[in-house]
Amino acid sequence: MKENTLYIKKHSRINSTVIMLPASKSIANRALIIDALAGKKSPLKNVSEARDTVTMQRLLNSDGPIWDVLDAGTTMRFLTAYAAVRAEEITLTGTKRMQERPIKILADSLQELGADIKYLNNEGYPPIKIKRIKDQLTSRIKIRGDISSQYISALLMIAPELPEGLTIELTGHIGSRPYIKMTLAVMKAFGVNADWKENIINIPKQSYHPAQYTVEPDWSAASYWYSFAALSEDAEIILKDLKDDSIQGDRRIADYMSQLGVSTEFTPQGAHLSKKAHEANASFDFTDCPDMAQTVAVICAAKGITCKMTGLESLRIKETDRIAALQTELSKFGARLEENEDQWLLVPAHSIAELRSPEFDTYHDHRMAMAFAPLSTLGDIKIKDPEVVNKSYPGFWKDMNKAGFKISEL
């Protein structure tokens, strides 16, 4: 099937633009799982329209024997744990890429707890068949802290449902702490308390209670508007209802962008973005906010900022190998992402004049499309397979239109 391509005309000034961001799919997916465990009686407000969240809603309301999560990694992991406490027998599957993304660490933990899980194709990968836990075999498990926080969050959300509760010992370095904290915060909103001391999280047997819950605007989506502000000649952007005291780890982008040329003022209306001077060199650790890496890499590449980057390891098992994808696409305008063991150096383009109507591939990855789209502040560009943004930000191209960009299909 032929992929569509968007042609975006250069638009370098973004003034007096108010953007209503999509709801956070990370928060929404947690709230949906917890609400299902609480009996599906909660009035949830501002639930994300992202494809991942729509898929989660559809499957939680399905009584079929097969749950197809498409390309939604969070949905796959959260539903795997949910099925282990609620489903008599369910087969979980997804796209070809989803069947290449590992599930073994989570599945091992669930089997240790008493779930019956079988791999239907390749060991350690979807599709899998799950039969729920009938007799809890242990109340304490160990899991690596440096793997996907979605595995840990999946286990945390089902912990109060287990007859003996659950104590999780996180071994080694703990990455993506903000996502674990986010999970515990949403759980608390539905009446469940946890105790997290050092590397031990203890959740006694409890019951979730229905609650009125409003999902925050998405800080991941906000990051692309920071990029538009950073790369434009002039910008005044208001991100409506975006708050400073967010439970999302990607709130950190506001701090990073202070070094990269964007100031943030939080007002009753939301976050007000405007331009400021940027630094020539930067150094960032993305361990706790890996989804920000592509956005920051493109900004630095285009603004002539040399950037040392760490914490990118998890990017290899996302919708695509995001490190390889970045290296290929950044090279199209003279920038490089050099790898040296567990560190990466972003070497910027010598001159953005090299940006001569390039066509950027997106690798079936929503974040590649949105990370590279702000280059249209510097020149005409083309984005292949633009529909990938539906995964997290379905209104992205419409919001670009609202900000003054002229976009057409080729």
Image: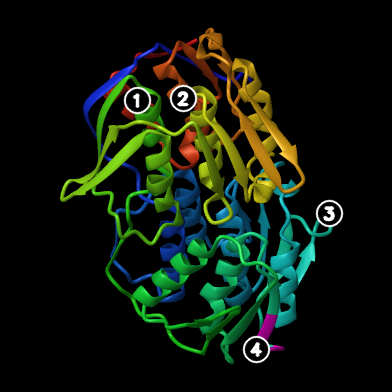
In this rendering, which labeled residue sits more in front, label 1 or label 3?
1
The mark found on residue 139 in the picture is 4
- For disc 3, the marked residue is 122
Q: What residue lies at 67% left-to-right and 88% top-to-bottom?
A: 136
The mark found on residue 230 in the picture is none
When asked about the image quadrant of residue 233, the answer is: top left
Say what secondary structure mark 2 lies in: helix
The amino acid marked with disc number 4 is Ser
How much space separates mark 2 and mark 4, taking CA atoms?
Answer: 47 Å
Say what secondary structure mark 3 lies in: loop
Q: In this view, does 246 lie above or below 325?
A: below
Does any portion of residue 5 appear in the rendered image? Answer: no
Say what secondary structure mark 4 lies in: loop
How much space separates mark 4 and mark 3, taking CA atoms?
Answer: 29 Å
Q: Tags 1 and 3 in contact by the CB under 8 Å rule? A: no
- For disc 1, the marked residue is 400
Q: Callout 3: 10 Å neighbours few (<14), some, many (20+)?
A: few
Stretch of the chain drawn in magenta: 137-141
Q: Callout 4: 10 Å neighbours few (<14), some, many (20+)?
A: some
Name the N-terminal-most of marks 2 and 4.
4
Q: Callout 1: 10 Å neighbours few (<14), some, many (20+)?
A: some
When asked about the image quadrant of residue 321, the answer is: top right
- For disc 2, the marked residue is 373
Q: Between 249 and 275, which is closer to the camera in this rendering?
A: 275
